[in-house]
Image: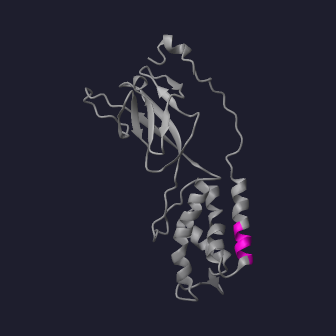
């Protein structure tokens, strides 16, 4: 959904979209005050949803550049430095939460192997063993990111972040907090509907077949971790 669509739905919920079929003027009955508050409340709703009911996954390739390689990599280079016997990668600014069990080490010969050999340092860095990410190898991680927020005065056609079903919950959140000081009954009705939609938008249950991590390094002799 676009910002314009969400804004219109909010006004419809508040019965302030039209009067006798004519759109309500921004100068009528403090209409502009409502319009000014909507973008920030949409941002609040997107942040609430993306950090609870419907997190946003993102994939990031962590690449160490060979200093002797003159060819430019097509992959964006994530900032990194050496940290003792580890390589320390800086996590992106939109990093919210690490997704465990979805980290791969890609070897020189193109094999993608599950790995659990990494550490999170605070919420800013990912540490991986230096010997396991030599030039030509990459780590690929999946993490949950914060949503892209709206500007203070967003364009009408800007698309909201996250998946489509989250967009249909947002107008109820916005409408609830627009009337919170004026009508407790309406606030409760709108917010309860928002909560109801949140409970129904989980990712669902699925099954995946994956190899068990070689936590004892039994495969080390075969060259998997050398």
Q: Report the front residue among 187 and 58.
A: 187
Task: Report the label total.
Answer: 0
Taking the spot 44% from the left edge, 30% from the top edge, the residue there is: 128
| Residue 172 locus on image (x, y percent) | 66, 68
Residue most toward the top?
221
Q: Report the front residue among 41 and 217.
A: 217
| Residue 175 locus on image (x, y percent) | 64, 73
Relative placement, left or right, of 32 versus 178 is: left
Quarter holding the N terminus is bottom right
Say if 183 sits above or below 40 in the image: below
Q: Report the front residue among 165 and 19.
A: 165
Taking the spot 57% from the left edge, 71% from the top edge, the residue there is: 7
State the image quarter where residue 107 is shown: top left
Residue most toward the front?
84
What main secondary structure does the magenta stretch of the protein show?
A: helix
- Residue 2 appears in the picture as rendered: no
Residue most toward the bottom?
28
Relative placement, left or right, of 7 versus 139 is: right
Q: Is residue 39 magenta?
A: no
State the image quarter where residue 17 is shown: bottom right
Taking the spot 52% from the left edge, 24% from the top edge, the residue there is: 113
Say if 165 sits above or below 137 in the image: below
Q: Is residue 187 magenta?
A: yes
Magenta segment: 185-191
Say if 65 sits above or below 3 in the image: above
| Residue 115 locus on image (x, y percent) | 53, 27
Quarter holding the C terminus is top left
| Residue 203 locus on image (x, y percent) | 67, 46
- Residue 210 appears in the picture as rendered: yes
Relative placement, left or right, of 42 versus 62 is: right
């Amino acid at each position: 959904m676009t910002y314009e669509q969400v804004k219109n739905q909010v006004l419809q919920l508040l019965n302030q979209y039209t009067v006798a079929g004519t759109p309500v003027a921004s100068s009528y009955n403090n209409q502009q005050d409502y319009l000014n508050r909507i973008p920030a409340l949409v941002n609040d709703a997107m942040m609430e949803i993306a950090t609870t009911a419907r997190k946003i996954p993102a994939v990031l390739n962590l690449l160490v550049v060979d200093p002797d390689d003159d060819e430019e990599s097509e992959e964006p280079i994530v900032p990194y430095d050496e940290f003792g016997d580890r390589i320390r990668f800086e996590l992106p600014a939109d990093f919210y939460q690490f997704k465990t069990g979805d980290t791969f080490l890609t070897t020189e010969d193109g094999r993608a192997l599950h790995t659990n050999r990494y550490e999170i340092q605070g919420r800013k860095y990912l540490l991986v063993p230096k010997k396991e990410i030599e030039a030509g190898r990459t780590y690929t991680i999946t993490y949950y990111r914060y949503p892209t927020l709206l500007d203070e005065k967003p364009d009408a056609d800007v698309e909201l972040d996250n998946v489509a079903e989250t967009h249909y919950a947002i107008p109820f959140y916005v409408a609830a907090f627009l009337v919170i000081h004026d009508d407790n009954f309406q606030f409760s009705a709108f917010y309860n509907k928002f909560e109801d939609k949140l409970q129904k938008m989980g990712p669902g249950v699925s099954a995946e077949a994956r190899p068990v991590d070689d936590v004892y390094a039994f495969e080390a002799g075969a060259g998997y971790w050398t």
